[in-house]
Amino acid sequence: MDQPNAIDSGPAVHLAQDDGEVFRLGPLEIIVKENGSGTRMNLASAEFRGSTFRIPPHIHTEHDETIYVLEGRMGVRLGDRTVTATTGTSFTIPVNVPHAIWNETGVLVRFLNIIVPARYLDYFREMAAAAGAGLPPPDVIARVMGHYGLRPVAP
């Protein structure tokens, strides 16, 4: 019997550690764990892996992210605070909070990025497609960031 207010959703999915859509954005490997199709586009999640990277300061004007460190350590700037995020720690990046993330140790860090709503996962796909082997030129970065409501901020 159908429930009158039931919302259709996709089947539950189980993925092993290295399973999922994989692509690179410069020095980061990104493994999509949930693309939004199983959550009615409410959230997406992806594992990021890298040993040397720097995500420059920026803000999100339309989406939130929560990051959970699976392995290693990385620097994080959240507003006026700078912290070292280590294995087992997490942090949330609400709308309009300036932030930056980096790992310059040469040692692998793995972190799970939960993105709400899910459509903002496409920012990483679009940036990766524009990047090729390195990083996209500044004008392309600005265009893609603008399309997804991201704005660079001064360091």
Image: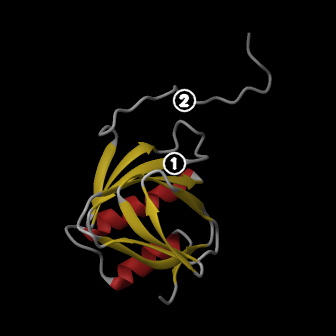
Reading the chain from its start, which is encountered first: label 1 or label 2?
2
Q: Position of residue 41 (x, y in %)?
A: 58, 45
Residues at circles 1 and 2 in contact by the CB criterion of under 8 Å: no
The residue at 38%/59% (across/down) is 125
Residue drawn at x 58%, y 39% is 39
Pick the residue in front: 65 or 62. 65
The residue nearer to you, when weighing 114 against 92, is: 92
> Closer to us: mark 1 or mark 2?
1
Circle 1 crowding by C-alpha within 10 Å: few under 14, some 14–19, many from 20: many
Q: Left of 153 or right of it: where is 139?
A: left
Tell me residue 15's x, y (percent).
Answer: 38, 32
Q: Residue furthest left?
A: 133
Q: Amino acid at mark 2?
A: Gly
Front position in the image: 86 or 155: 86
Secondary structure of the residue carrying tag 2 is loop
Q: Which mark is residue 19?
A: none
Q: CA distance from mark 1 to mark 2?
A: 14 Å
Q: Position of residue 140 (x, y in %)?
A: 36, 78
Q: Residue furthest bottom?
A: 154
**Percent coordinates x, y for residue 96 in the rendering:** 64, 75
**Number of residues whose C-alpha sits closer than 10 Å to that of mark 2, classed few (under 14), some (14–19) or many (20 or more):** few
- Tag of residue 44: 1
Task: Determine which residue is flagged by label 2.
Answer: 10
Identify whether 51 is placed above or below 21. below
Q: Is residue 40 placed above or below 152 in the rendered structure? A: above
Q: Is residue 149 left or right of residue 108?
A: right
Secondary element under disc 1, as helix, strand or loop, is strand
